Image (spheres, rainbow, N blue to C red):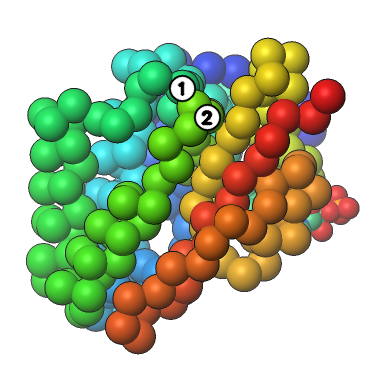
C-alpha cells in the first residue's frame, strides 16, 4: 500500500470531504449536536465541507491518496489567512446554522463554537482546521504523513501551529508532534474542546 500525500486537486474536493466525514464518525461533539445517528452522518459533510471549500482556494488543503482514491484530508490555514473576511465567515456560519438547525443543543452549540472562535490565538500561526483519515486506513501512518509537510515547514521557518480537538484520545496523538494543551473549553453541558499549540522545533 503506497500512499501519495499532496495538495488536494480541487476536482477531488467531494472525495476529500467524504473521506473526512467518514473519519469523524462517531465523534463526541457532532454526536452531541445531532438528534440521532442518521442526522450525525448528514451533518458531517455540511460542517467539514464548509471548511474545505473555504480553505481550498488558499492552497493548503492536503490529501492522502491510495489506488487513486482519497482516503485522508488535512486542511490548514497559513499565517495571514485568518480571521476570515466577513463574506467567508458568513458562509461558514450559515453552513453551521444549517447543520445545527434540526439537531439538538443548537443555542449552546453556537455559543460553544463562538467561544472556541474567540479563543483563537492572535499570534501568527498555521491553523489545522481539519485532519481525518478514512477509518479503514487509520493507524498506518497516513495522519502523520498528512501533518508532515506543514509541520516541517513550521520548523524550517520558525512558525507556530495551532489546532482544536474534541477527542480526548487525540491529545496523546498530537502531543507526539509537539502540540501542547493551551486551554479546554466547555459551554453548559457541552463536551470539552481542547486547544493545542505547537512551538516550532529547532
Ligand atoms: C487522528 C487521526 C487523524 C490519526 O491518523 P492515523 O493515520 O490514524 O494516525 P497515524 O497512523 O499517523 O499515527 C498512529 C500512531 O499514533 C498513535 N495514536 C495515539 N492516539 C491516536 C489516535 N487518537 N488516533 C490514531 N492514532 C493514535 C497510534 O498508537 C499510532 O502509534 P504507532 O505508530 O506507534 O502504532 C485519525 O485517527 C482520524 O482520522 N481520527 C478521526 C478524526 C479525528 O479525530 N481527527 C482529528 C481531529 S482534531
What is the x, y in percent for residue 189? 35, 85
User: Does 114 sit left or right of 197 as displayed?
Assistant: left
Q: Residues within 10 Å of mark 2 (few under 14, many from 20)?
A: many
Question: Seen from this angle, which residue lies furthest right?
Answer: 202
Q: Is residue 106 left or right of residue 15?
A: left
Viewport quadrant of the N terminus: top right
Residue at figure coordinates x 60%, y 18% from the top left: 6
The residue lying toward the viewer, choosing from 95 and 65, is 95
Marks 2 and 1 sit apart, C-alpha to C-alpha, by: 5 Å
Q: Is residue 170 above or below residue 63?
A: below
Q: Could you tell me if residue 11 is visible in this image?
A: no
Relative to 168, does residue 160 appear above or below in the rendering?
Answer: above
- CB contact under 8 Å: marks 2 and 1: yes
Closest to the observer, 200 or 110: 200
| Viewer can see residue 62 | yes
Up/down of 185 relative to 16, above or below: below
Question: Is the residue marked by circle 1 packed among few (<14), some (14-19), or many (20+) residues within 10 Å?
Answer: some
Q: Secondary structure at mark 1?
A: loop
At a point 25% along the width and 57% down the height, the residue shown is 114
Residue indicated by mark 2: 125
Q: Quadrant of residue 177?
A: top right
The spot of residue 66 in percent (x, y) is 65, 30
Q: Position of residue 182 (x, y in %)?
A: 58, 56
Residue beneath disc 1: 79
In terms of secondary structure, where does tag 2 sit? Answer: loop
Residue positioned 59% across, 35% down in the render: 161
**Above or below for 25 versus 125:** below
Q: Residue at x 51, y 67 (%)?
A: 184
Which quadrant is home to the C terminus? top right
Amino acid at each position: 500500500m503506497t500512499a501519495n500525500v499532496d495538495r488536494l486537486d480541487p476536482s477531488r474536493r467531494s472525495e476529500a470531504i467524504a473521506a473526512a466525514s467518514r473519519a469523524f464518525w462517531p465523534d463526541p461533539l457532532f454526536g452531541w449536536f445531532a438528534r440521532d445517528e442518521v442526522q450525525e452522518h448528514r451533518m458531517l459533510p455540511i460542517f467539514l465541507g464548509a471548511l474545505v471549500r473555504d480553505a481550498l482556494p488558499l492552497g493548503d488543503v492536503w490529501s492522502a491518496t491510495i489506488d487513486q482514491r482519497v482516503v485522508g484530508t488535512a486542511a490548514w490555514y497559513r499565517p495571514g489567512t485568518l480571521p476570515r473576511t466577513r463574506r467567508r465567515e458568513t458562509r461558514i456560519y450559515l453552513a453551521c446554522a444549517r447543520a445545527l438547525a434540526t439537531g439538538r443543543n443548537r443555542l449552546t452549540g453556537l455559543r460553544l463554537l463562538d467561544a472556541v472562535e474567540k479563543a483563537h490565538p492572535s499570534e501568527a500561526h498555521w491553523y489545522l482546521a481539519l485532519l481525518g483519515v478514512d477509518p479503514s486506513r487509520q493507524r498506518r501512518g497516513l495522519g502523520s504523513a498528512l501533518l508532515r509537510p506543514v509541520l516541517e515547514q513550521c520548523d524550517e521557518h520558525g512558525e507556530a501551529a495551532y489546532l482544536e480537538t474534541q477527542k480526548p484520545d487525540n491529545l496523546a496523538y498530537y502531543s507526539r508532534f509537539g502540540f501542547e494543551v493551551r486551554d479546554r473549553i466547555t459551554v453548559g453541558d457541552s463536551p470539552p474542546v481542547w486547544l493545542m499549540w505547537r512551538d516550532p522545533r529547532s
